[in-house]
Structure formats: structure tokens, C-alpha cells
Amino acid sequence: MYTLNPLSFLRVYGVAIGIGAAVGLLWGFLLPSFGLLGFFMIFIGMGAGYGMANVVELAGGRKRGPLVQGAAVTGIIVAYLVRNVVLTGSPLVVNDVWGLIFVGIAAVVAWNRLR
């Protein structure tokens, strides 16, 4: 249940990074400003974490454990960095409180889903 062979490891991380990049692009183009969403980013982060966990779990053949958890969190961080590059041209943005709250909640939900 907790061991991945090298092919599954690459597949899990490849899917996580690919989905993270795609979600980051959509996030940057469709939801450029958080002024309208604010508090609802908490719930959107929960959904994003749950979705990323499910996709990564399917890619790994329903395996769970620290490697799969790390892949899901990596995908969420990639989504945040891609979104920042799309919006500002820089991977890190100053005073992006709601974006960081989104990433933190999504990462915690994904991590706990894959325990």
C-alpha cells in the first residue's frame, strides 16, 4: 500500500506537476483577482486539495503514503507558482494572503486525504 515502484513514482509526480501547471494556468487566467472571492478561497482550497489528492491517488494505482502525499503537495505548489508567473511574471508575490491561504488549506487537505 505504501511502496511505489519507479514507474509509478514517475507517473505520480508527472501527473501532479502536469495537473498543477494546468490548474495554475486556469487559475491565473480565469481568477486573476481575489478581491471578489476572498473568504471563499478557503472552500475552493479544500476542493482543490481533495481533487489533487484523488488524481494523484488514481495515477499511483490507489497507493498512499509519504511519496504520494509529497506529489500532491508539489502539484499544489506548482499551481500556485504558475499562477503567480501568469499574473505578475514572478513566481513569488508580496502580500498574496488569500493565495497563501489557498495553498496551505489545499496542501493540508491533500496530505490528510492520502494518509
Image: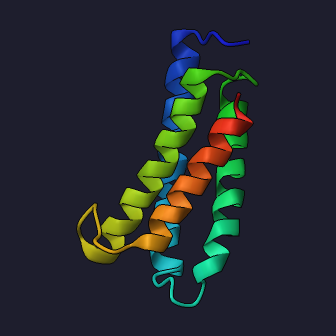
Is residue 23 visible to the viewer in this orientation of the structure? no
Residue 97 sits in quarter: bottom left
The answer to whether residue 5 is above or below residue 95 is above
Q: Quadrant of the C terminus?
A: top right
Residue 72 sits in quarter: top right
The answer to whether residue 83 is above or below residue 13 is below
Q: For this rendering, which residue is in front, 17 or 80? A: 80
Q: Quadrant of the N terminus?
A: top right
Residue 4: % across, % down: 60, 12
Q: For this rendering, which residue is in front, 30 or 2? A: 2
Residue 94 in the figure: left or right of residue 111: left
Residue 9: % across, % down: 53, 20
Q: Residue furthest bottom?
A: 36
Residue 94 in the figure: left or right of residue 20: left
The answer to whether residue 80 is above or below residue 57 is below
Tally of marks: 0
Q: Residue at x 73, y 41 (%)?
A: 54
Residue 101: % across, % down: 52, 64
Q: Residue at x 66, y 25 (%)?
A: 60
